[in-house]
Amino acid sequence: MRQVFYSYSNNQLKIKAGLHETQLGSFPILDERILGISADKTIGAFRFNLRGGTVMKNFARMGIFCSNRHLYGIISPNYTENIGKKPGDTNLAGIAINWDPQHKKPVQSQSSNNSDEFSEFSDEFSSDLDDKEIFQVSQVQFLFYNEFGNQNFIPDHKLYLGAFADMNLPYGFTAKVGGIYQNMSNNNTIMYIANLGRIVSWQNASSTRFDVTYIGKADVSQNALYMPIFSNLFLGEIMRLDATDFPLWTAKVNHRFPGKLNFNVGVKAVGQITGAKTNEQDLEIGITTLKHHLKVTLIGSRVQTNLVPEDFYMVRAEVRLAF
């Protein structure tokens, strides 16, 4: 049992309270299992995402019962060393304010299907785009986020201020730009991101997704380290690169074939620009069938890093059954 929570949802308000997984940020600064509250409120062209709670080592995403903890961590096995053991040790609070510049006031109210899951930030590739030569800002987000708690785990007060813009570009391309300022004692820095992507739909009902991202860092304090505890980006199937590994780049191509098996094949890569200069390439082949109840995935990976003398490889088969 990974989540125990109360939820409430209507057309304009969604609430979860208890032990649950949640995210915050157009580029997530929070992706964790918290004991607390998550609330999303829509008012006209604005959507407000509020998150607050505490995280404990045992139920964190890389905690004792999380299977990823036992598969990875080849170089840095302890992902939870900065997370407290009891409520109040490591806490978070934040709000994201989202503005839709293209919002039009509806002529009449329309009902929509409620969902038990949050969708606090939209996938920049999820909307249907035409190939007209248009430029359009689809979303602007302002982010305020704070991590605080016991000084043994969070010795300095950590405040994050961010802004992001999602755009629709000519010929079906999408883009995201933005950044987050980290305010800490003698550890001030700016994380910034530039992303470009596109989905191509083919006549046989298959689709191909392209995506490339650069995540950079501009230090205000000398040798500053960008270090939100609960970002859990997990970039790369083996190395699981995260915020402390910036600057880096990612690229991926995924093709989905038509048919009942939902066969897909993808290639993705991530590369660290400084530090250990870790690079990883992953090949993934998978099917989803039985009305999305069964998912079978085969993944092959290769890693080059200055942390070990030789390149190493991994092959993994994964079967997931959902009821």
Image (cartoon, grey):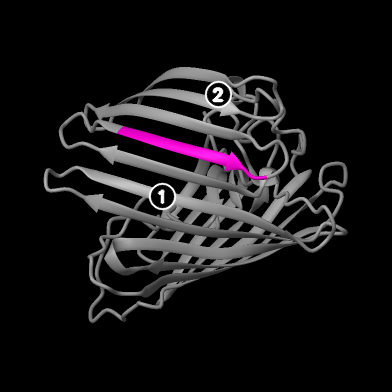
Q: Is residue 160 above or below residue 278?
A: below
Disc 1 is placed on an element classified as: strand
Q: Can you identify the residue that label 2 sits on?
A: 67
Q: Which mark sits nearer the N-terminus, 1 or 2? A: 2
Disc 2 residue type (three-letter): Ser
Residue 106 point in image, percent of width and height: 27, 79
Disc 1 residue type (three-letter): Asp
- In reply to whether residue 204 is colored magenta, the answer given is no
Is residue 113 visible from the viewing direction of this image?
A: yes
Count of numbered circles in the view: 2
In three-dimensional space, the C-alpha distance between marks 1 and 2, rounded to whole angstroms, equals 28 Å
Q: Residues within 10 Å of mark 2 (few under 14, many from 20)?
A: few
Figure quadrant of the C terminus: top left
* Label number found at residue 22: none
Is residue 322 visible from the viewing direction of this image?
A: no
Residue 321 point in image, percent of width and height: 35, 23
Magenta-colored span = 265-273
Residue at left offset 40%, top offset 35% = 267
Residue toward you, 282 or 160 = 282
Give the main secondary structure of the magenta stretch: strand
Q: Quadrant of residue 97?
A: bottom right
Q: Can you identify the residue that label 1 sits on?
A: 211
Q: Is residue 152 above or below residue 284?
A: below
Residue at left offset 41%, top offset 50% = 211
